[in-house]
Image (cartoon, rainbow, N blue to C red):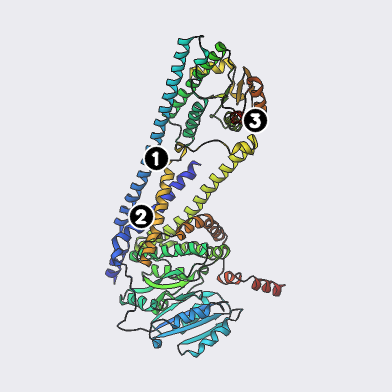
Amino acid sequence: MNIISGIVFVLTFLSVYVQVFFLITFLERKKNILIRTGSIELDEYPGVTIIVPCYNEEKTITITINSLLNLDYPKDKLQLFIVDDGSKDNTWQVIQEFTKYENIKVFHKKNGGKYTALNLGLEKVETPFLGCLDSDSFVDSQALKRIMTYFYDKDTMAVAPSIIVDKPKNILQGAQKAEYDMAVYNKKMLAFLGGIHVTPGPFSIFRKKVFEDLGPYRHAHNTEDQEIALRMQEHHYKIEHCPDAYVYTIAPNTVKKLYRQRLRWIYGFIRNAIDYRRLLFRKKYGTIAFFTLPSGIISVLSVIFLFIMLSYNLINFIVRKVIQINVVGISNSFSGSSFDLFFFDTKTIVFISIILYTSIIISLLLGRSILEGKPRVSFDMFYFMIIYSVIAPFWILKALFNAVRSKESSWTLEIDKRDARMVKQKNATTI
Amino acid sequence: MLEWLNKKMQQQFDFKRYIIVFFITLGLFLTAVYLSNYFSDKKLNQLKSIQDKISIDILSSETQFSLLSELSCKNVSDSVLSGELSELGQKIEWGQNNIGTTEELLYLKKYYSLLQIKDYILMKKISSRCGKKSAFILYFYTTAQNCSECEKESIVLTTLRDKYPELRVYSFDYSTDLSALKAMLDIYKIQDTKLPALVIDDNLLTGFHSMDELESMVKESFKLQDIKTIDEKKTVK
């Protein structure tokens, strides 16, 4: 147990370090966080192409495309490419209806995974800027204009938006809302330090030059949006974050769906981190090498060790209770022992945990204050901390396990499984 | 171009920031360590003051007993409530598991064993002179080696004492380095290979004994009433 508590001690130290790192950056740079309300005008409107890859999205694709059509941006400067990646439902029929718009082009291809759909779009792009939008997300009408202002800086090669969970309907989605809000804060701080490691699928905008110089999207263990960011970091391409460009996403509403999504993300992170391990602790790569990648690895390990600790304590408690019940019977094992403050645990690790949890709450509040103008406490934050500490270890452990065995978790499979009927059909045909 | 890249690299790798954050985090951790030590000290002080109080109580009872001699057995109060001593025992044990076996705790534990022996002797005297039968259990266990039977026996005894408030359980850690305790071990011929060991009514029992077994034994030798029957009587009155 001594080695384990030593490891836990080091990991909590590093986890608190990460939070303090963000906080110091925030205190130093908070005046530079630009939040605009209302419409703005740009000096010029460069051409932008948005690629929407879709696979079995007949229900949500209309909202996604409509939100793009409603973007406050000159229509002649905005191209939309809808790429159907071999959907098995009516997605193709649904997107046909949009061909009446002059600036929309639709493509159909054999199923090959999201990155192939994106690359098909990439090949046809003629504008100096491009972006993509996942078909489970939709954009705020001001998002694109606000993002484009960050390209006034000639060095900026890509800009990531703020992703917000759309109207959480249950506790799980609420927890994710808190998490996404915190991610806005983390992302902005990473942007200040030049250490962003993901240009998320929902509405990150790139200069076309990025792909001309560095090549198209790669499969990248089904997390192409992480890989392209790492590739850009490797080549010192600046990635910005625009906190007031809002993109709404529909968060998984069941534990199972969330589990699949996170399994893919964490697995992708681990594999991409391995693929790009040459960046780690190399001075010339800066923040990504010394902070972003290490802190990702720390959080993976921390969650696992926290889980081991909690399980160990829980099992210990249960074993003791069982012995007690065996020895003196149920009726005698729950009586007596009045509450005494003396027995309140005051080991160092308890205070350290309090510090860690406080720092996480501060991060959650700062995320919210960036988005809403003031730090508002909500139940979502507690749902987040409770739910994630219980279930996150499972997808992290599974992702780690899969990474060791190099077992892919696929994007298409994730969507396939959303519809049990679809899977059954698939089985029927294979039989 | 190279210059631009260098500038960029400097911008991105800000060594000072990493050092400052390290010291802030270290500061937070040292605060946690300090707080933990502070509370541990407070707890140890609390233990000491409980122990002092019990020690005064026992001393005062002894003195009272010598003064009054046989004249008025009625006036001799139970020196210390059995609950108080056992609570102290529980707290010391908890401290050993959670604060760590420090010099101070070992000292407290020795003192605690001594207080128990004193209380035991006093109670024995009172019972023989006043012809009042008191219920004692002497319990010997060990923490030096992993003794699962001891853990089980402890649970049984705690439950038993909660059930019969008049029962006095004196528990002794075999490995405590105290000459008075060594004498007790000699008197009852306790061996470390036969732990847990119990002395009830001058009979030596070794190994684990279940709740039912001990309960019937206690009831028989001391004619004890459990807490429920006492409560019932009170309500009837």
> Label 1 is placed on what type of residue?
Ser
Cα separation between marks 3 and 1: 38 Å
Quick check: do tags 3 and 1 share a chain?
A: yes
Pinpoint the chain carrying mark 1.
Answer: B
Picture residue at 50% right of the left edge, 16% below the top: B76
Identify which amino acid the numbered label 2 is placed on. Answer: Val
Residue denoted by label 2: A20
Residue A152 in percent (x, y) is at 31, 77
Residue labelled with disc 3: B211
Q: Residue furthest front?
A: B237
**Whether residue B103 can be seen here:** no
Q: Which kind of residue does numbered mark 3 sit on?
A: Met
Q: Nearer the viewer, mark 3 or mark 2?
A: 3
Marks 3 and 2 on same chain: no
Q: In the picture, residue B223 is in which quadrant?
A: top right
Write the residue at 43% across / 17% down: B60
Q: Which mark is residue B36?
A: 1
Chain letter of disc 2 in the image: A
Q: Residue shown at 33%/65% (left/top)? A: A192
Could you tell me which chain the residue with mark 3 belongs to?
A: B
Q: For this rendering, which residue is in front, B219 or B229?
A: B229
Mark 2 falls on what kind of element? helix
Instruction: Please state, as top left, top right, bottom left or bottom right, where the C terminus of chain B lies in the image.
Output: top right
Check disc 1 and report its element: helix, strand or loop.
Answer: helix
Q: Are marks 3 and 2 in contact (CB under 8 Å)?
A: no
Residue A428 rendering spot, x and y as whole percentages: 71, 73
Q: Is residue A158 left or right of residue B126?
A: left
Q: Quadrant of the N terminus of chain B?
A: bottom left
Would residue A290 be found to the left or right of residue B68 on screen? left
Pointers 1 and 2 in contact (CB under 8 A)?
no
Q: Residue furthest right?
A: A431
